[in-house]
Amino acid sequence: MVNVVVLAGHYYPLFSANGSIMKNLIDELKTEHKITVIAVKNNFMLSDYEDYDGYNIIRLNEFATCFHNFCERKKHSTKGLMKNVYNFLLQSKRGLLLLKKVLKKESLDHTQVKKHYKALQKLNEKSTIDVILPVSLPFESFVAAVMFKETHPNVKVLPFQLDHFSDSETLHNFSFIKKLRYNKHIEIEKECIKNSDQFYILPQLKEHYDDKEFIHFQDKITVCEHPLIKAKVINVLNTIKFNVNRINLVYAGSLYKDIRNPKELLDILTFIPSDENICLNVFHFGNCNEIIEDFKGKLGDNLQNHEQVPSEVSISAMNDSDILVSIANKINNQVPSKIFDYLSFGKPIIHVYHDDNDPYINLLNEYPLVLCVKIDNEKIEDNALKIQEFCKSNSGKSISFDKIQEKYFYATPSFVASKFSKEFI
């Protein structure tokens, strides 16, 4: 049995997309190995230690994220003066973090690097760590794992790169900061790969790592797909009660104004007659809640804003939906992992996208129950009619999980986990 420590970012109970991916890998690995998860705390109410699903979670404090989520919840649950107070606190926090980012030499939080490193040291004192499996983002987990390996050369470091770092369009806030720090960040990436035993990336990152800067590391780089094609376990206690007289569409995932904005989709839905009873249920986190609330006046009961919920609840909602809705990123080198979750349910899917080069169009064109809708302000009414007709003709249809698993085997947790576990020995 190998002692594996996973640096998972935001994890149970409020999983980030990357945290959900790591959960699937852990579910495969924990049957044969000892697992400990080091996570980043994203809620003040969460404990520092927790036993969960057969392994331990250690949570590292991250005040900024906890404070942000606290103020977001309070802003949406209060009215009048207090609502304005929490909004002011959120804007002040954003301003301070932005100033801090601009003044730094690189887009790394060295406080978080140190916290991850110290947590690894403490764990190693209790039981020798054999393997560290860090996920990025946060990239700080990679840096901490490599630092730990410098003083513990026998440990194996197997990073899973799920997002861009030096080439990110959003991490650095401004394009000029990205350009100024690019060479520095490339050197940090090269150092991480150099000191890793193997380096795993998603397909959309391959072009970046095929660059001449990484030519000497090609034998270490392994391409893996999102390990999200998985049969879902539904807890009836977490079931959302949908109105059975409506066709219930579900969107579940993050929404950010600059990356994955729901406004264009909501604009289209306003052109569908209300008596068609096509209802969009949104389960989300990010910074688009006010946009969704503004559309409530136009869509009425055909728009239900559920905000952020535990993953068990969103899984139940996706399972009970008639049709699933996917919103593509505006930035093509950042691919939402949610589409693989959707495929697992075998439900009809509406995919709304902006660019003909959207990386998932080819994948979805192989799926029998899909409607891909390109955002076009001159074709809003046409797109509304397409969605309306698709919903009416496909509601209630499904594809068996066995067929889904056979077709997309390369995105199953067992297939991807095997690529990691073969490096453990």
Image (tube, rainbow, N blue to C red):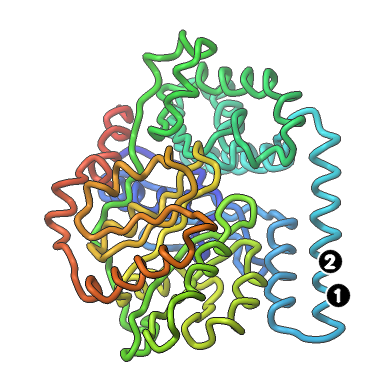
Label 2 secondary element: helix
Mark 2 neighbour density, 10 Å: few (under 14) some (14–19) many (20 or more): some
Most foreground residue, 309 or 235? 309
At a point 47% along the width and 43% down the height, the residue shown is 355
At a point 22% along the width and 52% down the height, the residue shown is 367
Q: Quadrant of the C terminus?
A: top left
Task: Give the residue at mark 1.
Answer: 85
Disc 2, disc 1: CB below 8 Å? yes
Label 1 secondary element: helix
Residue 113 point in image, percent of width and height: 67, 37
**Residue 128 visible:** no
Q: Which mark is residue 36?
A: none
Residue 116 point in image, percent of width and height: 62, 41
Q: Amino acid at mark 1?
A: Val
Task: Give the residue at mark 2.
Answer: 89
Q: Is residue 270 above or below residue 116?
A: below
Residue 112 point in image, percent of width and height: 68, 42
Q: Is residue 160 above or below residue 35?
A: above
Which quarter of the figure has residue 275?
A: bottom left
Q: How many marks?
A: 2
Q: Is residue 202 above or below residue 326?
A: above
In space, the residues marked 2 and 1 are separated at their CA atoms by 6 Å
Horizontal arrangement in the rendering, residue 168 relative to residue 371 (left or right)? right
Q: Amino acid at mark 2?
A: Leu
At a point 54% along the width and 78% down the height, the residue shown is 305
